[in-house]
Image (cartoon, helix red, strand yellow):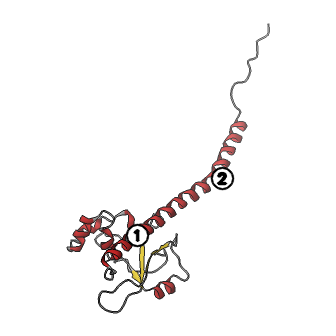
């Protein structure tokens, strides 16, 4: 009497390894595309932040007919981005409120490696403006730029005292180093 032979129902080790190798190859091809999509998304968010900061500053300038004093532009912008209570606290000198930095003041592609001793983070955007020497001046020109990653700066400068540069100084310092998204709106 013959014993019936059942058909094989499992996979051999070689077949399993081939399938795993094909899947790993497909993942390896897909991963750089996902990273590029993430960076593209971060770039879009950063450029939108720059646009919103510039728009808020432009609204303030068109209403008051003056640029804010040096280093005060982030506090002025807060009143135009629905952060008026925070702006009032900072204007009154309550710097403990500055531990909260609105997301509009940070570039998603840059990490917060620099912070003050109180844990207050920095601003990743730079106001480039040409000012008169004294007194309140009318706007000559301004632009908000993405701050270059490799640009040396004082890490103890809190975000609400936003960095500000003269156009010639900005061009000199950023000749070799550009921000990750090098956005500009004016």
Q: Is residue 44 left or right of residue 57?
A: right
- Pinpoint residue 160: horizontal percent, then vertical percent: 31, 73
Tell me the quarter of the image containing the C terminus.
Answer: bottom left
Which secondary structure lies at badge 1? helix
Of marks 1 and 2, the one in the foreground? 1
Q: Is residue 23 left or right of residue 103?
A: right
- Pinpoint residue 155: horizontal percent, then vertical percent: 37, 77
Query: Toward the viewer: 52 or 66?
Result: 66
Residue at point 49%, 76% (across, down): 148
Q: Is residue 149 left or right of residue 12?
A: left
- Pinpoint residue 120: horizontal percent, then vertical percent: 31, 70
Q: CA distance from mark 1 to mark 2?
A: 40 Å
Residue at point 22%, 69% (across, down): 89
Which secondary structure lies at badge 2? helix
Q: Is residue 4 visible?
A: yes
Q: Quadrant of residue 5?
A: top right
Tell me the quarter of the image containing the N terminus.
Answer: top right
Query: Residue 55, labelled with which disc?
Result: 1
In the displayed image of the protein, which residue is found farthest to the bottom? 133
Query: Residue 29, labelled with which disc?
Result: 2
Q: Quadrant of residue 13?
A: top right
Q: Callout 2 environment at 10 Å: few (<14), some (14 to 19), or many (20+)?
A: few
Q: Is residue 122 visible?
A: no
Q: How many marks?
A: 2
């Amino acid at each position: 009497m013959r014993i019936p032979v059942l058909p094989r129902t499992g996979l051999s080790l070689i077949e399993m390894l081939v399938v795993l190798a094909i899947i790993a190859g497909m993942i390896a091809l897909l991963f750089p595309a996902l990273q590029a999509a993430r960076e593209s998304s971060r770039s879009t968010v950063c450029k939108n932040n720059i646009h919103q900061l510039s728009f808020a500053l432009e609204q303030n300038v068109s209403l008051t007919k003056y640029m804010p004093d040096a280093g005060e532009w982030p506090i002025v912008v807060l009143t135009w981005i629905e952060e008026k209570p925070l702006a009032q606290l900072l204007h009154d000198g309550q710097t403990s409120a500055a531990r909260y930095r609105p997301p509009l003041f940070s570039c998603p592609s840059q990490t917060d490696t620099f912070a003050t001793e109180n844990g207050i983070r920095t601003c990743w955007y730079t106001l480039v403006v040409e000012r008169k020497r004294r007194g309140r001046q009318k706007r000559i020109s301004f632009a908000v730029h993405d701050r270059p990653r490799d640009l040396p700066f004082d890490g103890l400068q809190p975000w609400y005292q936003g960095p500000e540069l003269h156009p010639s100084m900005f061009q000199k310092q950023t000749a070799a180093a550009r921000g990750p998204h090098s956005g500009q709106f004016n």
